[in-house]
Each structure stands twice: as C-alpha cells, then as structure tokens.
Image (spheres, rainbow, N blue to C red):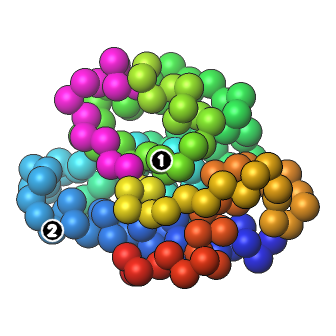
Amino acid sequence: MRTLSKAIIALAVMTVLITAVVLGSGMLRSPSSGDRINTVVTIVPQQEIVEAIGGEHVSVTLMVPAGQDPHTYEPTPGQIMAVSQADIYFEVGSGVEFELTKMSTLTEVNPNMAIIDCSKNITLLDLGGQHADGGGQSRSMHMMGRTLTSGSLHLI
C-alpha cells in the first residue's frame, strides 16, 4: 500500500509540473472569463491535481471513474463528447490499460487535442511480473512506485 501511495504522489507531482508548464508557457489559449481549458485525464489523482492548479480556468473530464477497472472500462457517450471538445489530454502514459486500448480512438475523435504523456522522462522499471506489495495493483502503478523507490525523482 505504501508503494501505491508513493506512485500516486509521483503521478500527482508530474501532473502538477506538466500543468504548470503548459498553462504558464502559453501553449494553450489564455482563457477569458467563462472560457475554460477543456482537459481530459485518465485517473482520479490527475483530476484532483489539474483542478487544484487550474481552478476556474479548467474543466476536467475524468475517463476512468474511481472504483472502475482501467482494464475493462468503456467510455460513455458523454465522455466521448467531452473528448471531442477537449483542448488537452493528460495521459498517465506508463501502460495503463485504458490508454493502451482507447487512446487511438480518442485521438480520432479529436485529432487537434494536445496529448501530454505524464510519464515522459520517468524511467519505469519492469518488476518481472512481481508485485511489490503482493496485491493486485496495476503493473503501471507498481512500476511507478518502484521508480520512486529507486531514486528516479530527479525531475521533481
């Protein structure tokens, strides 16, 4: 469980850094009053971070709701509509099953949407099928947690 907490913290920090860079660099249009940056994220920790940083300037669509399995989750028509209007998608990028199977469809729906890979410049270590906590966490979260413990936080 401690590994999962570290992985979530790393993901949150990466999302914060990427959001700050994107919003601060002018890569996206500057929102006027009532004009929000439409963002899409894969998992709940990303949603919380983007909302905390973007505040009233962002609208965040969550693709895999809390309690849902990213291996089997199918996006709803409403989520697909939100993707079609999105400015940016923050993908976990470390092998989350939802992204592996759905990103090509989502980018077809909105080819102009910017895609930010939150695992970029993070070295993911393969645990050879071993789970650090013996539980059923997803492989990507284990790899992210393992990366944390191996001292790869030089980005932060």
Element class at badge 2: helix
Horizontal arrangement in the rendering, residue 20 relative to residue 33 (left or right): right
Disc 1 marks which residue? Answer: 93
Judge by depth and name the residue closer to the eye, 78 or 137.
Answer: 137
Q: Residue at x 49, y 62 (%)?
A: 123
**As displayed, is residue 72 above or below residue 6?**
above
Q: Position of residue 33 (x, y in %)?
A: 13, 56
Disc 2 marks which residue? Answer: 24
Judge by depth and name the residue closer to the eye, 19 or 3.
Answer: 3
Q: Position of residue 24 (x, y in %)?
A: 15, 68
Q: Residue at x 59, y 43 (%)?
A: 96
Packing grade of label 2 (10 A; few <14, some 14-19, many >=20) is few
In the rendered structure, which segment of residues is drawn in magenta? 106-117
Q: Position of residue 152 (x, y in %)?
A: 50, 76
Q: Quadrant of the C terminus?
A: bottom left
The span from disc 2 to disc 1 (Cα, nearest Å) is 22 Å
Element class at badge 1: loop
Q: Position of residue 142 (x, y in %)?
A: 70, 60
Front label number (2 vs 1): 1
Q: Residue at x 37, y 30 (%)?
A: 83
Horizontal arrangement in the rendering, residue 121 relative to residue 136 (left or right): left
Residue at the far front: name it.
128
Judge by depth and name the residue closer to the eye, 136 or 56.
Answer: 136
Q: Amino acid at mark 2?
A: Gly
Residue 58 image-quadrant placement: bottom left
Q: Is residue 51 visible?
A: no
Q: Amino acid at mark 1?
A: Gly
Is 153 magenta? The answer is no
Horizontal arrangement in the rendering, residue 112 relative to residue 142 (left or right): left
Horizontal arrangement in the rendering, residue 66 relative to residue 44 (left or right): right
**As displayed, is residue 29 above or below residue 132?**
above
Query: Which is nearer the N-term, disc 2 or disc 1?
Result: 2
